[in-house]
Amino acid sequence: MLRIPCPHCGPRDEAEFSYRGDATVTRPGPEDGIEAFHGYLYERRNPRGWQVEWWQHGAGCRAFLKVLRHTVTHEIRAVATATEALEVPEA
Amino acid sequence: MSQPHRLAAGGHVDRTRRVSFTFDGRRYEGHPGDTLASALLANGVRLVGRSFKYHRPRGIFSAGVEEPNALVELRDGARREPNTRATVVELFDGLAATSQNRRGSLAFDWMAVNGLLAPWLGAGFYYKTFMWPAAYWERVYEPLIRKAAGLGRASGLPDPDRYEAAHAHCDVLVVGAGAAGLAAARAAGATGARVILAEQDALPGGDLLNEPGLEPWRTEALAALAAMPEVTIMPRTTVFGFYDQGVLGAVERVADHLPEPPPHTPRQRSWTIRAREVVLATGAHERLIAFPGNDRPGVMLAGAARSYARRFGVRAGENVALFATHDGAYDAAFALAEAGARIAAIIDPRPDSPAMQRAREAGFAVRAGSVVSATVGGTALRGIELRAAGGSGRGDAVAADLLMISGGWNPAVHLASMSGAALAWDEGLQAFVPGPPAQRERSAGACRGVHGIGAAAADGAAAGRAAAIAAGFAAAPDIALPDAPAPDHRPHPLWEVRGRGKAFVDIQDDVTADDIRLAHREGFSHIEHAKRYTTHAMGTDQGKTGGIVGAAVLAEARGEPLAKVGLPRFRPYTSPIAWGAMAGEGVGAHFQPTRRTSLHAVHEAAGAVWMDAGIWKRPAYYPKREDADAWASVLREARAVRERVGICDVSTLGKIAVEGPDAAIFLDRVYANTFSTLPVGRARYGLMLREDGIVFDDGTTSRIGPDRFFVTTTTAQAGPVMQHLEFHLASVWPELDVSLASITDQWAGIAIAGPKAREVIAGVVSGLDLSNEAFPFMAVADCMAAGVPARLFRISFSGELAYEIAMPAGYAAHVWQAAMAAGAPHGIEPYGMEALGLLRIEKGHVAGSELNGQTTAQDLGLGRMLKKKGDFIGRVLAQRPGLTDPSRPRLVGLRSLDPRRQIRAGCHLLLPGGDGSSQGWITSATQSVVDPGWIGLGLLRDGEARIGSEMLAANPLMGEEVPVKVISPHMHDPENLRVRA
Amino acid sequence: MPRYSGFRILAEGLRGNSGWQPAWRKPAPKSSYDVVVVGGGGHGLATAFYLAEVHGIRNVAVLEKGPIGHGNTGRNTTIVRSNYLLPENNNFYEHSLKLWEGLEQSLGYNVMMSQRGVINLFHNDAQRNAALRRGNSMRLNGIDAEILDRDGVKAMCPLVDLDNGRYPVMGGLLQRRGGTARHDAVAWGFAHAADARGVDIIEHCEVTGMIVEGGAIQGVRTTRGEIRAPKVGLAVAGHTSTLTDMAGFRVPIETHLLQAFVSEGLKPLIDCVVTFGAGHFYISQSDKGGLVFGGGLDGYPSYGQRGTLPEAEHVYAAGISMIPALGRLRGLRSWAGVMDMTPDGSPYICKTPVRGLYMTAGWCYGGFKATPGSGWCHAWTIAKDEPHRLNAAHTLDRFREGRMLDERGNGPFFWAQ
């Protein structure tokens, strides 16, 4: 079971959160066309390794958080608020 | 009723009290402190079960969780528990156990004929036959196999007991309360850390329970732990899995040692434990040796026989042989000798060792350089055959009624492995031990190959101290450790003695060394293939005693080192766990929460029939005595709305307050239509799309002030819409100054609909001019309703003149009663979900069956709502060709040509005389009150073009085919005159 | 004469079972093949079998990084059915089910396909209407389906608690031809039969790179050297993105966990496959006696093959809510597979942006039942360089075109399928 350190509420069980996809994508502008939105919505990264992803603390502060998590070990290395930058490490 | 094999003194049983129990209907006695297995042995019961495939007689093999053989059906009636290991069942008065997997009696199981067929029932035989004729598999072969397979019988009755789920946090979790675990807990506890010490046994101590000389250290350690306020000892608690990030699952058997749980007590409690640091002190399981007849009742692990003698005061045999490959097993011979047994022989493949010398000095007949090549006897051991190690053929016979065996020890690495740690091969111990940790855990004692009580305790103390320091606590003074020199546990690598007869590597599933070799010969040489092909180590014991032996046989066949062959991956659970415990309390009526609106009691008093709407309970209809059936009630309620006035609870609709300077901009982006132009005091129907252009939800949203909106959602999507808004505000448009609050629970909603609605509202609401001019369709205003603050909306789902009153939830019953009183002169009637559905279908309003996540705005005839300018969610991808394809099914109305013939949602629409291909389907159906007969809404290819034509509503599942006419979905008052009246 | 038969078992039993040969050879890889199939699970092995059997393409290698059948083929709940709503899906799955029905005879290997019936329970009007729409869609496409009332459910599965206190059972949609099969045997049977037709099954051979030149596939790099092939098919459930990353393009896939569970062995207790409509739960009993059951996704991307505790607890709770007699039985083992989740819940059997590179992927958690159909259609697509009509809709481009195959209307979220 994941334990996610919410910056507002402290470490909490995964059951309080819900996953909401890759947080490295940016919604295209209204004039960017179907191909751009297709990339945004469907062609997500699916790394075997580190991923920055959205989680909502739905049963807590309800904030959307960026979580740096490893998709094999499930280790969580960093959590940021929605407006903070959180990068995927190189290796 | 004597216990002929019970010792006069010693051990942890209370001889002052007697406990009565039955096995296969016969009465026996034991003592508190016994397990079912120790009590059976005390009474001389050797034969306790039959094996899985060949139905060979089987006895008690171990003294713990690793037991492959002694599986019984415990208790009876609804509490029957099949496959229960007699070796871990604490004896209680009145215990009833039955042997399982037999036809006929345990002694004369006629399925034992399978043993004669063994040459044809080897590993995987079923994959190679039973293929012809094709139809015979389900009809003939498989039923025979299924009947023969399986172990015990389930009761088939609902479990009468209750289970709890509980949660715990600690700095250091210590798993296992043997010498290592006790020392670890003491060392960690001494630092002030919060420690949980979980032990699967009822008695903490592990191997200390077999060492009377060390009992003072055990009791002193327990007393010290009991004195530490931050230390919790959890006996009868099995840690079954090590999950991510320091979370472990455990089951506490609260009442399994009692005939039934006392009042207000669960049978078991499942624990989710979150630990900063974990010390695994799970010990080791003794390893069997594969030799012909190694499964006969009377063959027992050496450590188990020692434990029966020392802990339980039971002599498991009178004339005893020991077959061991290392010095660590020899204490069993001494223990049995102390217990009064005769040591007939000690058989050891090694030439010499310190333990052998001591055994010789004690007068035991030591057969160095020898192995056991066969066992003799029927359902009980009578003797063994020996021969020189490395030799072949038959050897000397030695009479014995108990053969104690030990091929070494298998560290219980299950939890370390589940935590992600790789396993490492230890050549000296001929065993896999935990490699470097992947999580914050460390192993101590026998589970990492440190044997002997003194060494294990020292290892545990070091691990406990290190864990506490890692958890942030300061080191504390050293604790006293027991002084107990350990014999050498490093075994001579002897896995198998070959000879005539079956040498089992998995005693429960009847897997022999020959089966493993057959698997290899057929190419199933990878350990996972061999396991799956032979079912090796897949029984309830998960190969705790013989798993590695099978791997070793495979390694030899492959000609590769065992370290390379490896073991199958360890997965939860360390031991089987009760389904009820994993499920906890959230079952049956509590499987999901039940949501009730603030008007629930009002509906209950009105006699509502309930229906589930998601997790909500909503009134379906309100039957009256004169109603012939449910339809009569529904039609009566709908008629009241069409002709007079009705009242309905709409509190379950989602309600979201959207406020802030950028609220209007935000709503313009999340709705497909425009809200920034909505005047204050007006409501508008809104349509939300998902980003993929599919309709997400609809609802009425009102502007309460320049920066304040009141959004409503459908009942089903209240949560998802809230999350959708929050997500986009946080991630896509964080610059917008908007706040969101879900107020579904705070506000109740009451709809009052029908030609007389205005009169009823006038009797309830004050402070508003209700005239059509002052308060027209889609008007919104704050008001007082029955003396309480409220908000009035002139909106309509039914297609009639209608209002919704929103008020703080606590006032809802008060307002409802005022409305009922005001409506009484007008014949007001409450209407439920069924009538609501009828009315909206007549009106052509879409609901959940049409907003099903597969439809576009165009599909639903709402395409014109999409604004032409500006960004909104779903705008771009809604333009994809597949979604704008004119051949997509469109919303239509349908009417059964024969008003008596029912059409149903889920019928498909076919062309009369066509090829039978589906042209669409019916999404919703009902009887009509404005034009009696069956009507519906549907999605139909070329729907608009087909209005006026006839189709068939086909329901082959129910053998129905009903001619229907395609009509406009707006069947009732298409000009909207009534809602604007 | 078939290699495996009752007669052969009799004969071998009389001479100590010493004459059995490996079920498939263990060849070293050649430097080139006509077709390389990456992934030695059920889908990859089936692809190779049908390439050889139907299309006569026998110079084929199946490359598997571990032992065959050890991915999702060996860690699922073994359910086989074709009870889908959308014609594009139910026609495909029905083709697959028909292949299942003759699979033992095609392969000469007993995969223990057992048509015990699959029931989907429903608990309210909306679920019943959806079951009717789906069942009628099946019937109109020539697929067997029946609607059961409460008595019908009780007769098929007497242990189901029809009045479970929270979501009483209203009825069920039954597909009698659905059932279960022995999952491991499916991989072994396809391997055995493909091998007999000349296919090289190369285990412990991990693909480390894709050789793409001029937009066309030329072969693969592996831990056992470079292997050239003008056509390469991917059948690597859960790891598709890793391979397509190597080939230089992205696919709409996110990899998620699905847990499954088995109980201790029991005498026959549950005779059919039954799914709970009020919570994500399904159960059947294996021929060995274990109850095999599972639930929904763990809810976040993972390649870890390691499940989470709260989802497991939910699965057990749903089980007892449906069948209260399960309470005193014991869970023996749980495991997790990694699933290619797609944004509409439907798979890809298609060509890719790289010429000569094909894939069968995106099986979400429905891949096992598709095994023969997937292999059959994938083989067709590889052999003909165009899809069969049964998989014409299962393209990567369907999201670009807005032609999603969204059975349940949950899209476009990978984790919500």
Image: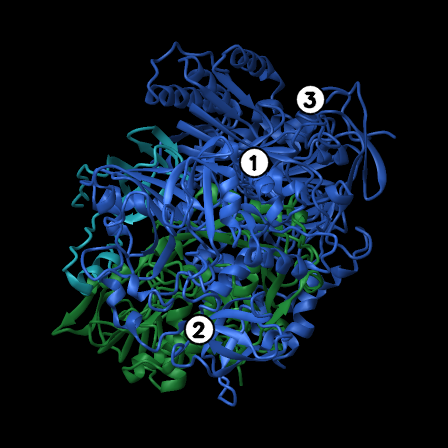
Instruction: Give neighbour class at mark 2: few <14, some 14-19, many 20+ (Cα, 10 Å).
Output: many
Q: Residues within 10 Å of mark 1 (few under 14, many from 20)?
A: some
Q: State the residue position of label 2.
A: B968
Q: State if disc 1 and disc 3 touch (CB < 8 Å).
A: no
> Which corner quadrant holds the N terminus of chain B?
top right
Name the tint of chain A in the rendering.
cyan
Q: Position of residue C224 (x, y in %)?
A: 25, 64
The answer to whether B145 is drawn above or below residue A69 in the figure is below
Label 3 or label 1, whichever comes before in sequence order = 3
Residue count near mark 3 (Cα–Cα under 10 Å), binned few <14, some 14–19, many ≥20: many
Q: Give chain C's shade.
A: green
Which corner quadrant holds the C terminus of chain B?
Answer: bottom left
User: What SS does tag 2 mark?
Assistant: loop
The reply, left or right, for residue B796 in relation to residue B47 is left
Q: Which of these two is toward me, C310 or B974?
A: B974
The hue used for chain B is blue
Residue at 56% in and 11% down: B223
Could you tell which of marks 3 and 2 lies nearer the N-terminus? 3
Q: What secondary structure is found at the residue carrying circle 3?
A: loop
Q: Amino acid at mark 2?
A: Ser
Q: Which residue is mark 1?
A: B813
**Residue under pointer 3:** B11
Mark-to-mark CA distance, 1 and 2: 39 Å
Structural distance between the alpha carbons of marks 3 and 1: 69 Å
Residue at point 57% right, 41% down? B822
Residue B357 in view (yes/no): yes
- Residue positioned 61% across, 80% down in the render: B134
Amino acid carrying label 3: it is Gly
